[in-house]
Image: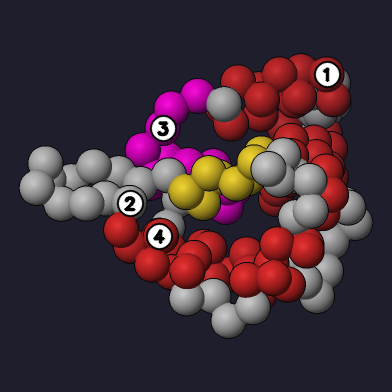
Amino acid sequence: MHTISDIQLPSELVDIIITEFWYSEHPSSGRITFMKACPFINSIWRDVYARITSRDIYVPTAAYLLYLSSIIPRDDSPIYGRLPSDSTRTITCYVDLTNSTDDAAKDPYSVFCSLPNYLGFRRCFSSIE
């Protein structure tokens, strides 16, 4: 008899699930929950997640942008470490709109501009236009 942990979805179905979620609009809290849980389901989910999410990176918080800038140059990520950084096409800083008088993009933009080594960060993602 199989337990729930023995059951695995085919990688093609996992690919569809992750792709559909990744390219859909979600509030930052939902995207963060997905980003935290998905790679830890099993190795199939981790590998498919890494391939899809490294191609088009979403940055849900300014803190994640700092984290990303710290792990990518060193290949220090247990999820993305094996993937070439030149496979990245886009990096999208996604912000939740909170108040119509606030500039929601100001926080991630100011963090991005203050990164200590913009050229090094740019070199890590050479295929981004």
The image quadrant of residue 54 is: top right
Reply yes or no: does residue 80 show up in magenta.
no
Between the C-alphas of marks 2 and 3, the distance is: 16 Å
Amino acid on which the number 4 mark rests in the picture:
Pro
Instruction: Report which residue position mark 1 lands on.
Output: 12
Q: Would you say the magenta stretch is mainly helix, strand or loop?
A: helix
Q: Could you classify mark 3 by the number of other residues whose Cα lies within 10 Å: few (under 14), some (14-19), or many (20 or more)?
A: some
At x 43%, y 44%, the residue is 94
Where 22 falls versus 125 (above or below)?
above
Horizontal relation, residue 57 to residue 128: left or right: left
Query: Closer to us: mark 1 or mark 3?
Result: 3
Task: Looking at this view, name the residue that lies furthest to the bottom.
Answer: 116
Name which of mark 1 and mark 3 comes first in the sequence.
Answer: 1
Q: Are marks 4 and 2 in contact (CB under 8 Å)?
A: yes
Instruction: Report which residue position mark 3 lands on.
Output: 26
Amino acid on which the number 1 mark rests in the picture:
Glu
Q: Which residues are magenta?
A: 24-38
Between the C-alphas of marks 4 and 2, the distance is: 6 Å
The image quadrant of residue 62 is: bottom left
Between the C-alphas of marks 1 and 2, the distance is: 35 Å
The image quadrant of residue 28 is: top left
Query: Closer to us: mark 1 or mark 2?
Result: 2
Instruction: Report which residue position mark 2 lands on.
Output: 105
Between the C-alphas of marks 4 and 1, the distance is: 34 Å
Amino acid on which the number 3 mark rests in the picture:
His
Query: Where residue 127 appears, x then y in whole percent?
Result: 78, 46
Q: Are marks 4 and 1 in contact (CB under 8 Å)?
A: no
Q: Secondary structure at mark 1?
A: helix
Name which of mark 4 and mark 3 comes first in the sequence.
Answer: 3
